Image: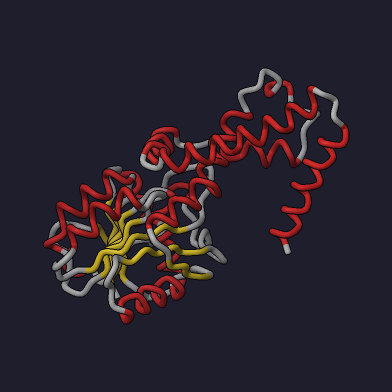
């Protein structure tokens, strides 16, 4: 099987490395950064460069760019893709991408499917790509309505075969609702939390809690700004709900309401225990 990977940053580079680690498939890669291409060749993450001439050879094309760039690339190359091949984006939002590419691929010979590898690191670029980044991770897939079951089954088998722990199928709406909570809100909270004037003085006073709360504040602000704004309605809702819950804690502290504060903490503990179970 031949894979084409557009974008060899952390996600695209890790996909390339994972495919080569887990299989004998051929991988072509493309990136505007010549250094990333060279690094990928040097560690045998790719077999060659993805070019205008060999796009049509790819059985699976994975687009690991920012959302708008992913849409632009797909629209520009839609007619060059191999008939029957899969074209899957790897963006952190799905409505923005799928609303534009579902109709564009309708009636075309290649099949588009929304995708999101549920793994990452707080650092970006091919230098931080790993061949085990997706071990035990989910690959989320959002097939277009009407996609035949054999194509869906084939997509699932492909991702399980290259190192993912599981494949989860969803809709663009459900994906964006969940990601607003599980990922985007966490980045907002981490970024806001680390801005306290006490942060520079933390050494010697901090342990796991501080480290966990601040880890994802080390983000790529250009990418996350685009992701936030392309999911602003759902992220705004989650942000407002968090503010409302924080106000409950604030009021209990302000009023020195011991019973209320204990109840709030108890509720949080019980929810966390239920989630862990």
Of 4 and 169, the residue lying toward us: 169
Of the 4 image quadrants, the one containing the C terminus is bottom right
Does residue 143 lie above or below 104 as drawn?
below
Report the colour scheme.
secondary structure
Spot occupied by residue 199 in the image (x, y as percentages of width and height): 68, 24
Spot occupied by residue 202 in the image (x, y as percentages of width and height): 74, 26
Task: Using the rendered view, name the quadrant where residue 5 is placed.
Answer: bottom left
Of 95 and 162, the residue lying toward us: 95
> In the orientation shown, which residue stands out farthest toward the bottom?
150
> In the orientation shown, which residue stands out farthest toward the top?
197
Does residue 101 lie above or below 154 as drawn?
above
Q: Residue at x 39, y 64 (%)?
A: 141
Of 208 and 187, the residue lying toward us: 187
Does residue 243 lie above or below 121 as drawn?
above
Spot occupied by residue 4 in the image (x, y as percentages of width and height): 28, 62
Does residue 202 lie above or below 265 as drawn?
above
Of the 4 image quadrants, the one containing the N terminus is bottom left
Specify whether 4 is left or right of 122: left
Task: Using the rendered view, name the quadrant where residue 157 is placed.
Answer: bottom left
Q: Residue at x 44, y 33 (%)?
A: 221
What is the tally of numbered marks visible in this picture? 0
Q: Residue at x 42, y 40 (%)?
A: 233
Spot occupied by residue 80 in the image (x, y as percentages of width and height): 13, 62
Specify whether 94 is left or right of 52: right
Q: Residue at x 57, y 41 (%)?
A: 186
Of 96 and 233, the residue lying toward us: 233
């Amino acid at each position: 099987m031949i894979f084409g990977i557009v974008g060899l940053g952390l996600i695209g580079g890790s996909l390339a490395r994972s495919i080569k680690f887990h299989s004998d498939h051929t991988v072509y890669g493309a990136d505007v950064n010549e250094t990333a291409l060279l690094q990928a060749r040097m560690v045998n993450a790719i077999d060659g460069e993805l070019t205008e001439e060999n796009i049509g050879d790819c059985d699976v094309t994975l687009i690991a760019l920012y959302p708008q760039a992913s849409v632009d690339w797909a629209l520009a190359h839609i007619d060059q893709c191999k008939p029957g091949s899969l074209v899957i984006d790897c963006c952190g939002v799905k409505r923005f991408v799928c609303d534009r590419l579902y109709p564009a691929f309708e009636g075309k010979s290649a099949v588009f499917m929304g995708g999101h590898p549920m793994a990452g690191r707080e650092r970006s670029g091919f230098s931080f790509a790993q061949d085990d980044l997706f071990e035990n991770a989910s690959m989320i897939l959002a097939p277009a309505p009407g996609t035949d079951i054999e194509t869906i089954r084939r997509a699932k088998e492909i991702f399980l075969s290259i190192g993912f722990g599981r494949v989860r199928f969803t809709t663009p709406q459900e994906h964006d609702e969940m990601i607003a909570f599980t990922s985007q809100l966490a980045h907002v909270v981490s970024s806001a939390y680390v801005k306290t004037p006490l942060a520079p003085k933390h050494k010697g006073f901090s342990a796991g809690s501080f480290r966990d709360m601040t880890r994802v504040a080390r983000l790529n602000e250009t990418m996350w700004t685009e992701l936030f704004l392309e999911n602003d309605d759902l992220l705004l809702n989650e942000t407002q709900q968090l503010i409302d819950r924080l106000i409950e804690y604030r009021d209990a502290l302000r009023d020195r309401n011991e019973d209320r504060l204990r109840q709030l903490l108890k509720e949080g503990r019980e929810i966390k225990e239920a989630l862990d179970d």
